[in-house]
Amino acid sequence: MYKAVPKNKNRGRAQIPSIIKIILTLAFSSLALTALADTTETADTIEGANWGIAIGYRYAHIPYPAKDESVDDFIPLLFYDGDIFFIRGLTLGAKLHNQDAWQFNLLGRYRYLDIPEEYQNRVQGNEFDVGGEVRYRFDNDFEASLEFMSDDDSRYYSSLGARYLW
C-alpha cells in the first residue's frame, strides 16, 4: 500500500531556528548602534570622523508558494556624514541645501525584492531607487523628514518620518 510522506521543503539545506535569527539580529543591531555612538562622541574632537561601519541581517518571509519559505542576507553597512555627501546604510545622498532648520537632499537607495533564492538571478528584482528628501530640524535633537522616491519602472512611493536624537 502506498503511504504519503510529507516532503521536506528545505532538504539538504541547514536551517537556522527563528530564535537564533532574532538573537543575531539584535546582536548585530547593537554593534551598529555602538559604532554610531562611538563616532558621535569622537566627531567633536577628530575632524572628519563622522563615520561608522556596521553589519545588518535581513530576514524576509516569502508570502507565496515556493521551495523556500524565507530569504535572508548579511548586509555590510557604511555610515558617513560629510558637508555635501552622506551614506546611511543602504542610502546615499547629496545635500543640496543645509541651512537653518531646512535641509533638501537628493537620495539613492538600494531596495531588496523578497523572492526565493532560486529565482533571484533570473528576476534581478533588487532595485536602486532615486528621489529627494526634505528635512526640518525643530531643534538639535528632533527632526522630521519627507521622502519621495521612484524606481526604474516609474513606480513612486513616499515616506514620512521623525527622529529624536538622545
Image (spheres, rainbow, N blue to C red):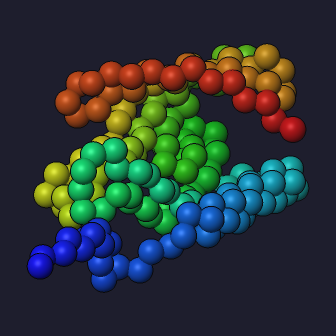
Q: Is residue 24 above or below residue 85?
A: below
Q: Is residue 99 left or right of residue 43?
A: left
| Residue at x-position 79% and y-position 30% | 164
The answer to whether residue 19 is above or below residue 36 is: below
Q: Whole-percent x and y of residue 117?
A: 27, 63
Corner quadrant of residue 53: bottom right
Vertical placement of 152 versus 34: above or below? above
Q: Nearer the viewer, residue 161 or 80?
A: 161
State whether residue 39 appears in this view.
Answer: no
The x and y percentages for residue 68 are 30, 62
Residue depicted at 63% across the width and 45% down the height? 82
Q: How many marks?
A: 0
Indicate left or right for 157 with 19 as reference.
left
- Quadrant housing the N terminus: bottom left
User: Foreground: 91 or 106?
Assistant: 91
Across and down, in percent, residue 93 comes to: 49, 38
Which residue corresponds to the image point at 46% horizontal and 29% vertical from the top-left? 106
Residue 108 at x, y = what percent? 41, 38
Residue 78 appears left or right of 26: left
Please report the residue visible at 62 percent of the width from the left and 51 percent of the height from the top: 80
Residue 69 sits in quarter: bottom left
Quadrant housing the C terminus: top right
